[in-house]
């Protein structure tokens, strides 16, 4: 019989079993198996502190490869806030948050990677961009309805973007 431990957080009456299934983690490294491909574009961008130099027309095009364990890798091309062509190469993970209906799923995504494209007088507009390649971490929340997906992506303290795309 597995030994029981009180649930962390002190809620009375809730117990977790110490069995291996209660603490299962995804396999590492992630499986190199393609579950689906997501192709997205930007619909709307807003800066939290608008500047006359900012553009809100990013023209984003991205492609993500997802595996069955919810890991992903992707590439995005877009015009940055200063209308410069920019690339984002990234890896990440998707986290299910629940279902609104039988067809609509809500999930979060967390990606991290390298950003290239902030150059010249705009090089210092993003942190750690000394060599015009900077690390980036982007959290998002989104919905999936059949083959359609949409995300709200927050890019640091600068702004947010709404994207939409299709799964293949």
Image (cartoon, rainbow, N blue to C red):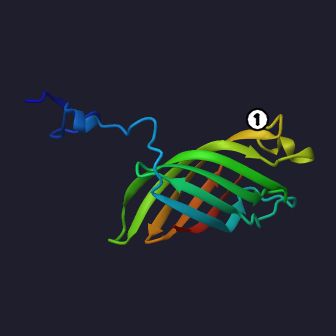
The image shows residue 91, relative to residue 52, as above or below, that is above
Question: Is 87 left or right of 19, judged from the image as shown?
Answer: right
The image shows residue 58, relative to residue 122, as above or below, that is below
Locate the N terminus by quadrant.
Answer: top left
Residue at the spot 54% in from the left edge and 54% down from the top edge: 65
Q: Quadrant of residue 97?
A: bottom left
Residue 156 visible somewhere in the drawing? no
Question: Is 4 left or right of 71, judged from the image as shown?
Answer: left
Residue 163 position in % (x across, y down) = 61, 65
For disc 1, the marked residue is 128
**Depth check, front residue: 140 or 20:** 20
SS of the residue under disc 1: loop
Residue 35 position in % (x across, y down) = 45, 57
Residue at the spot 51% in from the left edge and 57% down from the top edge: 141
Residue at the spot 68% in from the left edge and 56% down from the top edge: 76
Q: Residue furthest left?
A: 1
Q: Residue furthest front?
A: 33
Q: Quadrant of residue 38?
A: bottom right
Residue 117 position in % (x across, y down) = 81, 49
Q: Residue furthest top?
A: 3
**Depth check, front residue: 145 or 127:** 145
Q: Residues within 10 Å of mark 1 (few under 14, many from 20)?
A: few
Residue 53 visible somewhere in the drawing? yes
All told, the count of numbered labels is: 1
Residue at the spot 66% in from the left edge and 53% down from the top edge: 75
Q: Quadrant of residue 85?
A: bottom right
Residue 40 position in % (x across, y down) = 61, 65
Question: Is 78 left or right of 31, judged from the image as shown?
Answer: right
**Depth check, front residue: 49 or 24:** 24
**Depth check, front residue: 156 or 64:** 64
Question: Is 41 left or right of 110, judged from the image as shown?
Answer: right
């Amino acid at each position: 019989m597995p030994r029981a431990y009180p649930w962390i957080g002190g809620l009375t009456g809730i117990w977790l079993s110490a069995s291996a299934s209660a603490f299962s983690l995804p396999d590492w490294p992630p499986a190199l198996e393609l579950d689906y491909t997501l192709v997205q574009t930007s619909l709307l961008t807003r800066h939290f502190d608008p500047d006359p130099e900012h553009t809100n027309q990013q023209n984003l095009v991205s492609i993500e490869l997802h595996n069955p364990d919810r890991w992903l890798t992707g590439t995005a091309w877009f015009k940055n806030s200063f209308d410069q062509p920019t690339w984002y190469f990234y890896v990440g993970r998707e986290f299910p948050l629940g279902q609104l209906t039988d067809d609509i799923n809500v999930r979060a995504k967390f990606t991290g990677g390298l950003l290239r494209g902030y150059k010249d007088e705009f090089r210092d507009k993003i942190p750690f961009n000394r060599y015009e390649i900077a690390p980036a971490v982007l959290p998002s929340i989104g919905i999936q309805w059949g083959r359609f997906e949409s995300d709200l992506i927050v890019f640091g303290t600068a702004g947010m973007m709404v994207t939409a795309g299709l799964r293949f």
